[in-house]
Image: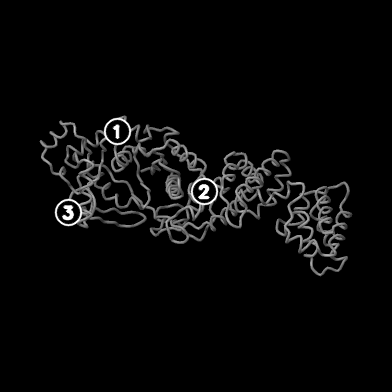
Amino acid sequence: MAVRVRFAPSPTGLLHVGALRTALFDFLLARHQGGQNILRIEDTDRSRYSEDSEHEFIESLRWAGITFDEGPHVGGPHVPYRQSERATSGVYVGPVSKLLESGDAYKAFDTTDELAAMRKAQEDAKEPVGYFGGAWRDADPSEVARAEAAGHKYVVRQRIPRGKVIAIDDPIRGHVEWSSDTLDDPVLLKADGMPTYHLAAIVDDHLMGITHVIRGEEWLPSAAKHVLLYRMLGWEIPVIAHCPVILGKDGKKLSKRHGATSVLEYRWEGYLASALNNFIVLIGWSPGDERELLTEQEMIDAFSLEGVQPSPGHFDLDKLKWMSGAHIRLLAADALFDAVKSYLEDPRTIEFWDSREAEPGKPSGHEIAASLTLLRDAIAKDPEYARGVVVLLRERVQTLADFGPGARFFFVDMPEMDPKAVEKWLTQPHVPQLFDSIVQGLDPIAQPTKEDCEALIRGYAEKHGLEKLGPAVHPVRVALTGTTAGPGLFELMELLGRSRIVARLRRAKEIAG
């Protein structure tokens, strides 16, 4: 039997990392088994549905590289793939009628006030809160007919049998059992004729031939009702797996303080999709060995539901940053430059950083946006020079956004000077002579190589009896970059070229004097 999985989000907000992990698990299982991955939009709650949210979901999944074999944007043999459209086409009418005829469902005419009174009475009596029968579960058929004839609104509820044990074998959580006496009667069809998740998901999973349902652990309490519904309709029950919750590094529920709140925000922050996927898949899943850096194909080859752990996974932003930097360094030079270029050409990148709130001790979002704009313009003006800068900086960045501030000194006429670096290194008495020596030693025509630059600085140090190279290297670095940190000095000198080196050393000499 071919594996068929589905990712079935309800577009009521933004796609978060927890949902991305579920989508990723679906994708990996389908590709590992040579099966099909289906996207289905569960939009029966029309009061909360957002068309913009649906577009954002699809864009997020596309950026993450999660592909679908069927769905609202690709078509397929089970159209439509939006539940609201399926409801309009009458997909759910037959199953509801069958459940009503068999007595496994019933019509309930409770008003909003009556339901509120029931809930209050249960709370006051410290009883389980829910609809465990009410007035309509065992109402006489004639009473039901009169209420319907009078035009009273009703919902259709599932009749949960009493005194039963319901069980599933979850590949993540093992054998799980419930007593049916703890389950309330859920609504299957709302008063407006729209199915609830409990009905629509089970009907659609059956009609679409879904073999494996992967979802968050918040749906575990509903699994017993769904198993019963499959049995009531006489359908085969798919494998149902419940993924553990994702917590912050501090063990608390994931929130803004732990990182971005939506998948696309990670895109604008400059994370590679490959890095985010690699990071997310390892929150609660293991490939069976000690590997941490995985390509998409390696994840596909290793993935199984048995590798998912039932205990909560933890979101560690520091680890994501490390993994992001590692994935950047895995890219070939041309691929890396193309990634940076595409990131900067998207206008939403600059917009994102321009509106970003400042964090203590870090450059403001406006400053980052300005540096990214500078890099973007430099790529358009002199792509070969900009490519060299990007490749040189690759060992020092964690995200694509880091290339902006890191590359800034390459593209300005004169870099901003760190006062502390100036005080420490440019005030030393040998610095003017050091700078003059380098300017005079540079070939007036040919561009210097990193070997040329190293020879000049080492030669000066040896000639003037400097025991260490630092007193020669650090002043030059400050003169050329404005700071004491950065990529290899000789490599950056080769990239800057003779005219920039000379201009910056002369300016630094004036500051030193």
Badge 3 or badge 1: first in the primary sequence: 1
Indicate the amino acid at tag 2: Gln
Residue 380 lies in what quarter of the image? top right
Badge 3 marks a residue whose secondary structure is loop
Q: CA distance from mark 3 to mark 2?
A: 48 Å
Q: Which residue is mark 2?
A: 297
Image mark for residue 91: 1
Say which quadrant the N terminus sits in. Answer: top left
Indicate the amino acid at tag 3: Gly
Label 1, residues with CA under 10 Å away: few <14, some 14-19, many ≥20: some
Label 3, residues with CA under 10 Å away: few <14, some 14-19, many ≥20: few
Q: Nearer the viewer, residue 57 or 234?
A: 57
Badge 1 marks a residue whose secondary structure is loop
Q: Position of residue 277 (x, y in %)?
A: 50, 49
Q: Are marks 3 and 2 in contact (CB under 8 Å)?
A: no
Label 2, residues with CA under 10 Å away: few <14, some 14-19, many ≥20: few
Q: Position of residue 419 (x, y in %)?
A: 73, 59
The residue lying at 29 percent from left, 33 percent from top is: 91
Badge 2 marks a residue whose secondary structure is helix
Q: Position of residue 195 (x, y in %)?
A: 29, 38
Image mark for residue 163: 3
Q: CA distance from mark 3 to mark 1?
A: 32 Å
Indicate the amino acid at tag 1: Val
Q: Nearer the viewer, residue 492 or 349?
A: 349
Q: Nearer the viewer, residue 307 or 273?
A: 273
Badge 3 or badge 2: first in the primary sequence: 3
Say which quadrant the C terminus sits in. Answer: bottom right
The residue lying at 59 percent from left, 44 percent from top is: 354
